[in-house]
Amino acid sequence: MKNNGPLETGCMSCNVRLNSVFNVLDNDQAKDLSLHKSCAVYKKGQYVFAENGLPAGLFCINSGKIKLTTTGYDGKEQILRLVKSGDIVGYRALLSNERYHCSAVTLEDASICMIDKKYFFDTITSSPKLMFEVVKKMSNDLKVAEDHIVSLSQKSVRERMAEALLFLKATYGFEEDNQTINVSLSREEIADYVGTSTESCIRLLSEFNNDKLISLKGKKISIINLQKLIQTANIED
Amino acid sequence: MKNNGPLETGCMSCNVRLNSVFNVLDNDQAKDLSLHKSCAVYKKGQYVFAENGLPAGLFCINSGKIKLTTTGYDGKEQILRLVKSGDIVGYRALLSNERYHCSAVTLEDASICMIDKKYFFDTITSSPKLMFEVVKKMSNDLKVAEDHIVSLSQKSVRERMAEALLFLKATYGFEEDNQTINVSLSREEIADYVGTSTESCIRLLSEFNNDKLISLKGKKISIINLQKLIQTANIED
DNA sequence: GGCATTATATGATTTATATCATATAATTAT
DNA sequence: ATAATTATATGATATAAATCATATAATGCC
């Protein structure tokens, strides 16, 4: 996969107010915002930002899916978050004035806006509403991370694998057939999210397939028996 | 351990401005703040707040140590964060207007202030400086949580155990002897942080003790060979 | 102060999962 | 198209760590 960098385009088509945190802005604020953002088109596999880089602004996903990934030990990747259109990325390092501690990589072709750093800070400083939206976003990411910690600490790889499929479904939803998870990840990427080896990931997916919990077609995973998958994930209630 | 609830006291002795996030307030703001907080003394093992409860305010640790813990699967505890004096707790649920997703329990006798919810919201809304301090705090907690995810995903229990000791040292520091970690946790609590069984935790501590990386005296753990402990934790550079 | 309970310790056994190995299928490049 | 590379699949083996078991030490309680 070649990385020629994103293709800069105008912002005619993209409406940043569709992005969750910005829908608290009024019309004037939204108009002003569009003057301070630049849109770009990214090919699948391109970096939106990279670990250790300095944030120049806030990224808003207009379309496409993104993984936030960090390099762990012996170069093994860890997928920390999965992001969908409407979401913001790169807000953590930006807000705390740090370097990125993870990279953002597109999982498919994507259209992404960048809002200038200074403008973003001015806007959230003057709009508590927007600030609270961003805070809620970070708060949710923290909660999700801590849930992941509990899962990694206490669940088997098998349970976490089932849980991961439910998480992918919750994040990206189904395709039109109402059963195929609407994202294409390699087995390795799934393993890098679950915290297991690629082989174990492949094996467990095969097993779930044999047990008719899911069905596999290339990278496409369909949930056939949701109830049993939930049981396998050992989700309490 | 009996839980008779915290003992309410006046706020003569405690100075909330010592708390990290509040040192951005000016004198007038700090004076005003002390009118809207109430101090209480907690015995070791008491709950400051409990999972699923609704936040009534923000807690500031004047003295004492706190664990944030959540109940995982089969009732197994997971320690999510360890908090020391000067820190705030309960900010996440408060800011996102949710119920607590973890409990806060004192690890030793503690003196803790609570700042009224409404007053806290008014203050951070009118003081972007304070808001940014709280945001930085949450940002850091998110970073720490994500580092923990990588560790849980990619490291062995043995490595994580060594890492946990270094983490405890980094969080609470040494006692006067300059080698004893300044916190008393049960083996089970350490296991609940590391994500392992109590037996494995005990076994590994014994092993580190035999290998002269640490020395054990009851719940007190001293780091004898920091260099080797770092190696055992497999910390990269 | 002695009894009950809980925490720590350590041994024996089992098991989930990583690792190593090899094969086939699917992409990508030439 | 064909070769080369990468992804997926599955078997065999090794091992870290959980679990079960029992003993001792420490702590809390009447």
Image (spheres, coloured by chain):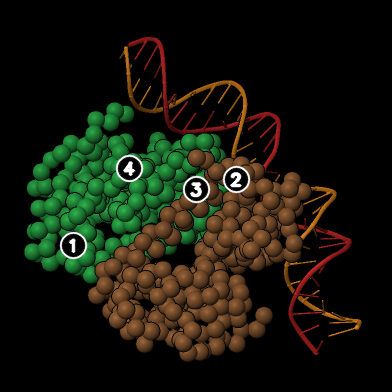
Chain colours: A green, B brown, C orange, D red
Q: Are marks 2 and 4 on the same chain?
A: no
Q: Nearer the viewer, mark 1 or mark 3?
A: 1
- Which type of secondary structure does the marked residue at label 4 adopt? loop
Chain letter belonging to callout 4:
A
Q: Nearer the viewer, mark 3 or mark 4?
A: 4
- Which type of secondary structure does the marked residue at label 3 adopt? helix
Q: Cα distance, mark 1 to mark 3?
A: 34 Å
Q: Position of residue B227 (x, y in %)?
A: 62, 44
Callout 2: 10 Å neighbours few (<14), some, many (20+)? some
Q: Position of residue A140 (x, y in %)?
A: 37, 62
In the rendered structure, which disc, 4 or 1, sits on the residue that comes first in sequence? Answer: 4
- Which type of secondary structure does the marked residue at label 2 adopt? helix
Q: B25 or C11: nearer the eye?
A: B25
Q: Which quadrant of the rendered structure holds the N terminus of chain B?
A: bottom right
User: Can you tell which mark lies on residue B124?
Assistant: none
Q: Are marks 3 and 4 on the same chain?
A: no
Residue identified by numbered label 2: B230
Residue identified by numbered label 3: B150
For the residues labelled 1 and 2, say whether their Cβ atoms are less than 8 Å apart: no
Query: Could you tell me which residue is drawn at 58 percent across and 42 percent down?
Result: B234
Query: Could you tell me which residue is drawn at 38 percent across and 45 percent down?
Result: A102
Residue identified by numbered label 4: A53
Q: Look at label 3 and name its amino acid.
A: Val
Q: C4 or B79: nearer the eye?
A: B79
Q: Look at label 1 and name its amino acid.
A: Thr
Residue identified by numbered label 1: A123
Q: C14 or B65: nearer the eye?
A: B65
Query: Could you tell me which residue is drawn at 56 percent across and 81 percent down?
Result: B42
